Image (cartoon, rainbow, N blue to C red):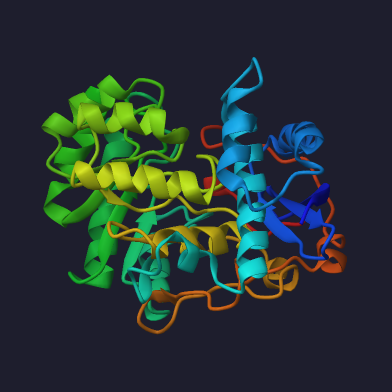
Amino acid sequence: MKITDVTTHIVFAGWRNWLFVRIETDEGVHGVGEGTLEGKENAVAGAVKDLKEYLVGKDPCRIELHLRNMRRDPFWRGGVVLSTAISAVEIALWDIVGKAYGKPVYALLGGAVHDRLPAYANGWYFGAKEVEEFAERAVRVVSKGYKALKWDPFRRADLEISRDDLRFAVDCVREVRSAVGPDVDLLIEGHGRFTPAAAVKIARALEPYDIFWFEEPTPPENLRSLRKVAERSPIPIATGERLFTREEFTRLLSLEAADYIQPDVVHAGGIMELRKIAAMAEAWYVQVAPHNPNGPVAMAATLHAAASMPNAVFIEHLMADPPWRSTIVTHDFDIGPDGRFALPEAPGLGIDLVLEEAARHPYRPRTLNFFSEESVLEQPVHKEA
């Protein structure tokens, strides 16, 4: 079997765009991957086009070899755009291999460790303004079966946090905790924007509300600053969505700066790289909660990767996508009444693109912004334009 073509498909998704990759073979077996990178979709599409020159004519089953060559051979290496393009290709190759052998991908990674994977809800709060609105929405989300909620209560705070913004955040967390009760895990999102001192102040203020983790409290570029927070925070620390490949996670783990790591299957190198990162984390007794706010193909890839990880603790599930999400794929995944995901059972990823439906939602420029008046956190999530 040989690769004959590699194409990209960009789909408008309300507040961002999804980017999908489809790889064709001469035996009629094709695979799909995802390389969504908000605001940089065209750059990823260009990088995939560059990778196509290497891929065409190759055996799609030699995934490890192709990963080594795509990373090692070019003079310019790394970076989020190239890493995302490689991730999208790698996911599509696993889809082909699974279909060729008639097995779901996780069965080829050593088999499932988990029968079902617990979910946490994200994106449910986009557009909420007042404390009471956060609490009301939280109750509705829990009624759908979710046992864990993540959100950012910090408005537009950047580096430092004002007394007013800190009071709002504390009030918000207190009201959500009161509304959902003691048996729901609360995960607080920092979006990588505080100084260590501000992050520690926030963590201490939120300690009374039994917070499961404080996510990305400091910017991702300086991991030593995160260690300062981890050493002083009464709340466990999670991070990793903006780290790429096992080398960067090696630095994070060796610093002992996080209790939970969050590699993203579409940025960190794909399914196998995620599995390798999780294996390293096991040696440090660190749990893995894959970052997963992307499209439906990324959801499938994340489930396969996490199913084979002994230390997988959560699957992120975004509730801010447009209603056409489920129409562009043959199958989308949702939680059951127990707040958990069932594992895919079909060969490969267990999902395929419906190209005709995807074409109905062509690319529209979007920039992922958290700090200005155009912040995605403050906008209606399904607006068309």
From the viewer's side, name the closer residue of 196 and 302.
302
Q: Is 157 placed left or right of 70 in the picture?
A: left
In the picture shown, does residue 373 fall above or below 149?
A: above
From the viewer's side, name the closer residue of 290 and 73.
73
Q: Residue at x 19, y 24 (%)?
A: 228
In the picture shown, does residue 22 fall above or below 221?
A: below
Q: Residue at x 71, y 36 (%)?
A: 44
From the viewer's side, name the closer residue of 363 and 58.
58
Look at the image and tell me whether residue 163 can be seen: yes
Count of numbered badges drawn on the protein: 0
Q: Is 111 placed left or right of 166 in the picture?
A: right
Give x and y (percent) for residue 2.
79, 52
In the picture shown, does residue 367 fall above or below 318?
A: above
Q: Residue at x 71, y 41 (%)?
A: 366
From the viewer's side, name the closer residue of 249 and 207.
249
The extreme bottom residue here reads 337
Give x and y (percent) for residue 260.
27, 46
Q: Is 328 placed left or right of 100 in the picture?
A: right
In the picture shown, does residue 25 fall above or below 36?
A: below
Q: Where's the N terminus, which quadrant? A: bottom right
Give x and y (percent) for residue 17.
71, 49
Look at the image and tell me whether residue 124 can be seen: no
- The quarter holding residue 86 reads top right
Q: Is 336 placed left or right of 348 in the picture?
A: left
